[in-house]
C-alpha cells in the first residue's frame, strides 16, 4: 500500500532528525505542500515536478539544483533551499518565492522572471544584474547581498522590462558586492547598496585608486565567502 494517499495536500516533517525524505510516492502527488526543513537530510535535491511548494532549508543537501526544475510544467509557488551545501549554477525556474541563500552557488544571477521574492544572498554569484520581469504580485523583494556581483546598478525602465531599482521594488539588498559608482538614487532609501565601491565617498577617483579599492574589496569578499562556506 502507498505510504501517502494521493489526496494528500500538505506534509510537514520539520524540526526532526530525518536523514532522508520518506515515501517515494511524494513525487507523484499533485500540488503537494512539502516541508522538510530543519533536518539532517543529505544527498541531492529531489525532483518533485508536481509539488506546489518545497521547503528543504537548513539541511545538508549537496550538488546542484536538478536541471528538470527549469522544465516543470506546474507553477511552483515556493522553493526554499537556504542553508545547505549546494553549488554550481542556478537554473531558470518558474517559482514565485525562491530562497537559495547561504549556499555556494556561482555564476550569474539566473533569470527568475516570474518571482516576486528572490533571496540569493551569501553565495558566490558573479556578473552584472540581469533584467527582471516582475509578474503581477505587487512588487519585488530582492536579496543579492554578500556575493561577487559587479558592474553598475541600473536605474532604467525599458518598455515591459523592469530593471532593478524602479518603482516595482518593494525592498532590496545589494550590499557587500563589487558594484561601481555612481549608485542610483534609490540606494539612499529603498535599497541597501553599502559595502560596494569604496570610492563612492570621494568627489574624484583615479584609475589607480579604483583598482586598489576594487582589489581590496574583492579580497575581503572572497575571504568572507570562504569563511561562510567553511563554517
Image (cartoon, rainbow, N blue to C red):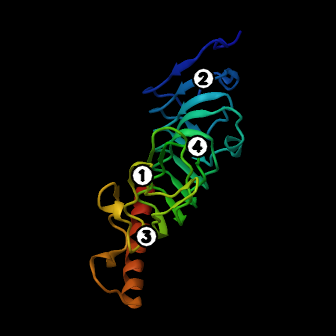
Callout 2: 10 Å neighbours few (<14), some, many (20+)? many
In terms of sequence position, does the residue under pointer 3 or pointer 4 come before the other?
4
Q: Position of residue 135 (x, y in %)?
A: 55, 42
Could you give the CA–CA distance between mark 3 and mark 1, rounded to whole angstroms?
24 Å
In terms of sequence position, does the residue under pointer 3 or pointer 1 come before the other?
1
> Callout 3: helix, strand or loop?
strand
In terms of sequence position, does the residue under pointer 2 or pointer 1 come before the other?
2
Q: Which residue is mark 3?
A: 178
Q: Is residue 182 left or right of residue 133?
A: left
Could you give the CA–CA distance between mark 4 and mark 1, rounded to whole angstroms?
17 Å
Looking at the image, which is closer to me, 191 or 198?
191
Q: Decide: marks 4, 1 in contact (CB < 8 A)?
A: no
Looking at the image, which is closer to me, 143 or 222?
143
Nearer to us of marks 2 and 1 is: 1
> Callout 1: helix, strand or loop?
loop
Could you give the CA–CA distance between mark 3 and mark 4, rounded to whole angstroms?
26 Å
Q: Which residue is mark 4?
A: 114
Q: Which residue is mark 2?
A: 32
Q: Position of residue 209 (x, y in %)?
A: 36, 87
Q: Residue at x 58, y 48 (%)?
A: 112
Residue situated furthest top in the rendering: 1
Q: Is residue 220 visible?
A: yes
Could you give the CA–CA distance between mark 2 and mark 1, rounded to whole angstroms?
34 Å
Residue 167's label in the rendered image is 1
Q: Position of residue 74 (x, y in %)?
A: 67, 32
Q: Is residue 193 visible?
A: no
> Callout 4: helix, strand or loop?
loop
Q: Taking 47 as reference, is 229 above or below it?
A: below
Q: Decide: marks 3, 2 in contact (CB < 8 A)?
A: no
Amino acid at each position: 500500500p502507498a505510504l501517502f494517499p494521493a489526496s494528500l495536500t500538505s506534509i510537514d516533517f520539520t524540526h526532526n532528525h530525518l536523514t532522508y525524505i520518506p515515501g517515494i510516492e511524494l513525487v507523484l502527488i499533485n500540488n503537494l505542500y512539502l516541508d522538510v526543513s530543519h533536518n539532517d537530510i543529505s544527498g541531492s535535491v529531489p525532483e518533485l515536478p508536481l509539488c506546489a511548494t518545497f521547503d528543504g532549508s537548513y539541511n545538508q543537501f549537496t550538488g546542484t539544483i536538478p536541471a528538470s526544475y527549469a522544465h516543470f510544467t506546474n507553477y511552483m509557488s515556493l522553493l526554499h533551499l537556504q542553508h545547505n551545501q549546494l553549488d554550481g549554477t542556478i537554473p531558470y525556474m518558474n517559482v514565485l518565492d525562491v530562497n537559495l541563500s547561504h549556499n555556494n552557488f556561482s555564476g550569474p544571477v539566473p533569470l527568475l522572471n516570474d518571482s516576486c521574492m528572490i533571496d540569493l544572498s551569501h553565495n558566490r554569484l558573479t556578473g552584472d544584474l540581469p533584467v527582471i520581469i516582475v509578474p503581477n504580485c505587487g512588487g519585488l523583494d530582492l536579496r543579492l547581498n554578500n556575493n561577487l556581483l559587479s558592474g553598475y546598478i541600473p536605474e532604467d525602465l525599458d518598455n515591459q522590462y523592469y530593471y532593478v531599482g524602479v518603482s516595482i521594488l518593494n525592498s532590496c539588498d545589494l550590499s557587500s558586492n563589487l558594484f561601481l559608482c555612481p549608485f542610483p538614487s534609490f540606494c539612499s532609501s529603498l535599497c541597501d547598496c553599502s559595502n560596494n565601491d569604496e570610492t563612492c565617498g570621494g568627489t574624484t577617483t583615479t584609475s589607480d585608486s579604483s583598482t586598489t579599492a576594487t582589489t581590496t574589496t574583492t579580497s575581503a569578499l572572497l575571504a568572507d565567502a570562504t569563511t561562510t562556506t567553511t563554517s
